């Protein structure tokens, strides 16, 4: 079975781990105790990984344009192709827009925006109203990302259990079971 390029595979898994971690950190941050600076540690990591995701999304977008993905297996219906393309395109959009709204909303407080404690990253200097709208958008896009992830995983389960075509191979995991697809 055709695979994505090595670069696409590495970026996919590296970013999947970071994005899932950031979704968890973002949605669960209210439950992290503030004592001992635990919440600020979690949110500090959230912001730093989020900024990293912006840089990686740009690299990935460039990589994707330079390295077209492998063709879908021949038995994919036109509906399946359309859904997969829409889902993947949606991921690319949200992968960039979601952390960008996070960066814009950093103006809601006066503390410097630290990148892993190594350096401070400049803020946009927007007014409170804009930063507050970015906050709302950040939350909404967080839900959109979660919904896309759920659809992505549902599609995968459908392919594993019903089509039994082991699409994971295309993303670098394991060996293909069906030759020639
Ligand atoms: C792909 C990367 C990111 C993901 C998946 C993500 C996801 C989320 C989610 C789901 C929430 C919870 C929203 C809510 O319920 O209010 C959240 C909150 C937050 N995010 Fe992000 N985020 C990302 C990047 C960033 C970046 C780059 C920054 C800042 C530089 C940031 C700053 C924050 C802050 C400060 C909150 C807490 C908001 C509050 O107090 O309610 N995020 N994030
Ligand atoms: C938030 C996390 C994730 C994001 C943002 C994401 C995003 C993407 C994107 C954009 C593609 C299309 C390839 C490309 O153009 O780069 C893709 C393909 C794929 N993903 Fe994910 N993914 C995530 C998590 C996962 C997880 C957890 C799994 C498996 C357990 C997975 C399995 C796959 C597979 C098998 C493909 C290949 C689909 C095909 O045959 O074309 N992904 N993913």
Image (cartoon, grey):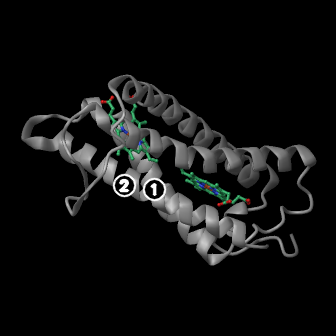
Q: Locate ligand 1 by image quadrant.
A: top left
Residue 67, quarter of picture = bottom right
> Is the CB atom of the residue marked by disc 2 within 8 angstroms of ligand 1's nearest atom?
yes
- Pick the quarter of the image with the C terminus: bottom right
The part of the image, by quadrant, that contains residue 70 is bottom right
Residue named by callout 2: 49
Q: Residue at x 55, y 60 (%)?
A: 58
Q: Nearer the viewer, residue 41 or 135?
A: 135
Residue at 69% in and 69% down:
169
Q: Position of residue 45 (x, y in %)?
A: 28, 51
Quadrant of res 29: top left
Q: Is mark 1 within 8 Å of ligand 1?
A: yes
Foreground of the two, 60 or 83: 60
Q: Residue furthest top?
A: 129
Dot 2 and dot 1 residues touching (CB under 8 Å): yes
**Pointer 1: residues within 10 angstroms few (<14), some, or many (20+)?**
many
Is residue 32 something that shows in the picture?
yes
Residue 59 image offset from top left, x and y in percent: 55, 66
Residue sitting farthest toward the left: 36
Q: Is residue 14 above or below residue 23?
A: below
Mark 2 vs mark 1, CA separation in Å:
6 Å
Quadrant into which the N terminus falls:
bottom right
Relative to 158, say whether 67 is above or below. Answer: below
Residue underneath mark 1: 53
Q: Position of residue 172 (x, y in %)?
A: 63, 71
- The answer to whether any part of residue 173 appears in the image is no
């Amino acid at each position: 079975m055709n695979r994505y390029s090595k670069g696409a595979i590495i970026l996919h898994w590296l970013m999947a781990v970071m994005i899932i971690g950031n979704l968890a950190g973002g949605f669960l941050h209210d439950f992290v105790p503030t004592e001992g600076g635990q919440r600020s540690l979690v949110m500090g990591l959230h912001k730093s990984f989020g900024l990293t995701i912006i840089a990686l999304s740009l690299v990935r977008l460039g990589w994707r344009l330079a390295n077209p993905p492998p063709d879908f297996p021949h038995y994919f219906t036109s509906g399946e192709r359309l859904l997969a393309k829409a889902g993947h395109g949606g991921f690319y959009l949200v992968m960039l827009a979601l952390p960008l709204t996070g960066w814009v909303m950093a103006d809601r407080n006066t503390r410097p925006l630290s990148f892993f404690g190594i350096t401070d990253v400049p803020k946009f200097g927007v007014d409170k109203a804009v930063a507050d709208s970015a906050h709302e958008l950040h939350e909404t896009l967080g839900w959109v990302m979660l919904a896309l992830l759920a659809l992505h995983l549902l599609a995968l389960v459908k392919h594993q259990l019903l089509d039994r075509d082991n699409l994971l191979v295309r993303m670098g995991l394991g060996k293909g079971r069906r030759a020639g697809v």
